[in-house]
Image (cartoon, rainbow, N blue to C red):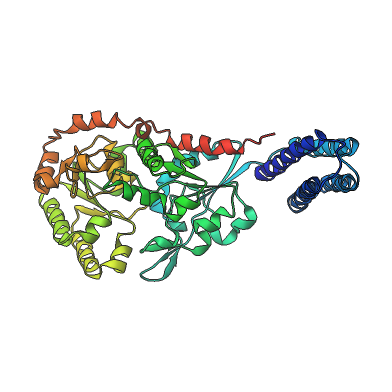
Amino acid sequence: MRCYIKQKILDSCNILMQNVKLFQAHSGQTITEAIYQNLCDYQNMFVELGEYIEKNCTEKKFLVQKLEWSCECLYRISQTDLDINLLNDIEENISFIRNNILDEKTDKILIYFLPYKAAMWDCFESIWECAKDDERCEVKIMPIPYIEKASGRVICELDQFDSDIPLIDYRLVKLEEVHPDIIYIHNPYDQANKVTSVVENYFSAELKKCTEKLVYVPYYLSSMYRNEQRLIEKACLPGSINSDIVILQSQVQKDIYKKYGIDCEKYFVAGSPKTDAVIKYIESNNKETVKKEWGIDGEKVVMLNTSITYFLNKEKWGEILFEILRIIDEKDITLLWRPHPLLEATMKAMNREGYKEYKKALAYAADKNKIYVDYSPNPLKAILISDALISDYSSLVVQYYLTGKPIYSLDGIRKCVQDSILIFNYYDVYLKSEGITVEQYIDMILENNDYKKNIRLERIKEYPMLMDGMAGERIHKYVLKYFTCRS
């Protein structure tokens, strides 16, 4: 028997038992109008439970007979008084149903992960690893389709996940019929995103109808928010509103939600599976082996991460990008450029001129044998084999920070430490805003002169939940506690 069905019946039996005991406490009383109405309401509860058992437990229809007799008892009581013998019969029927259901073996807890972008799978991976190794659980990964708004294309990235991740085809599954006990999502926007939108069937409001617990795990890592209002906006996204459980990276976020009177019962502070992914990958893979797989011979490798906001809004961003590419080309260094997986689609939808500049930069990179454009959905290989990072504001900066390797921030400003809400303080990296040029940074890497390394290593210690590699396990255990059937 499915866990949620078993629990629904047990909860109903408990409510029915509470009510019959109240009637027993007043046995012998004459039926007043108020008591009669209470008996009618009570009878409706038996009818609803009977209909639920008939629909969901076809092998348990014999229990419906017990419910039908209870309804007959209630009718007889309504014609006379609160007869203790009839009330005892009802109590006996409820106990029989309850004990019969308790004896039923509970099926495995069915869990569905619904990623929409393969590049964002790392926010689920460590949760999935715990769930698949838990003998109480049956786990499915079902990439869901999304619409690229600029082109109108419907895309599903089934073919972009690593081959060792078992996937099922969404076209073969009707979630409303399967009714997973738990559904994990990482897209909170539904129709509210200007660039992409999951297909309407998979909006969070629809998914909530198909599961007992809808769990939202952010696909990103937070560093800072300009003000409290920007953080509150995250709580107002459809996925956050509709989910039964929302995972938070830091207690700072939850405290601000409390301050604004947001009901925080659904929020669980766990760190982030994205940091679990980095820690595990670096510990279990060899840097030189991966470099060899990619055909990279250079001794020093720099990773360039181009996110969306900076390269969408920054004036002359094309000049900045070409400057980085040119400097790398002139130095004895290899560049791994990872454009954000939605950068091209965003440019197409919101910045056509910027899109032309972006395509020129890709063409320039293609002509240089020291510049690799990494389109793979998983950033962990690039994080592993690179010696340093250049990036704008991005959750990847937080992931990279945990490696202890140097970072150059294109848009970080020191005053943010005082003026913003810090979820993760990475502002002791090398900042363009403080006059350090890209060329100086590259020379520093070539000379092995990372003079801020010890500062960063000390800073990391302030975030134990991001460093222990246990976020996925914390989330899995927390969510599963709701599926220990209560008798």
Residue under the point 28% across and 36% down? 403
In the picture provided, is 265 more to the left or to the right than 357?
A: right
Viewer-side residue, 389 vs 436? 436
Q: Is residue 98 above or below residue 44?
A: above
Q: Is residue 193 above or below residue 227?
A: below
Residue 341 placement (x, y as % from top left): 33, 57
Quarter assignment of residue 146: bottom left
Q: Which of 275 and 100 lies nearest the eye of the viewer?
A: 100
Task: Tell me if residue 99 can be seen.
Answer: no
Residue sitting at x 32%, y 32%: 463
The answer to whether residue 328 shows anywhere in this view is yes
Residue 108 figure quarter = top right
How many marks are shown on the rendered structure? 0
Q: Quadrant of the N terminus?
A: top right
Classify the position of the C terminus by image quarter: top right
Q: Which residue is drawn at the image coordinates 22% and 60% (left, top)?
A: 313
Q: Position of residue 96 (x, y in %)?
A: 82, 37
Up the image or down, 467 lies above or below 341; here it is above
The image shows residue 446 at horizontal and vertical percentages of: 13, 40
- Estimate the x, y position of residue 334 in percent, counting from the top left: 19, 48
- The answer to whether 42 appears left or right of 398 in the picture is right
Viewer-proximal residue among 297 and 417: 417
Residue at (49% x, 42% y) in the render: 266
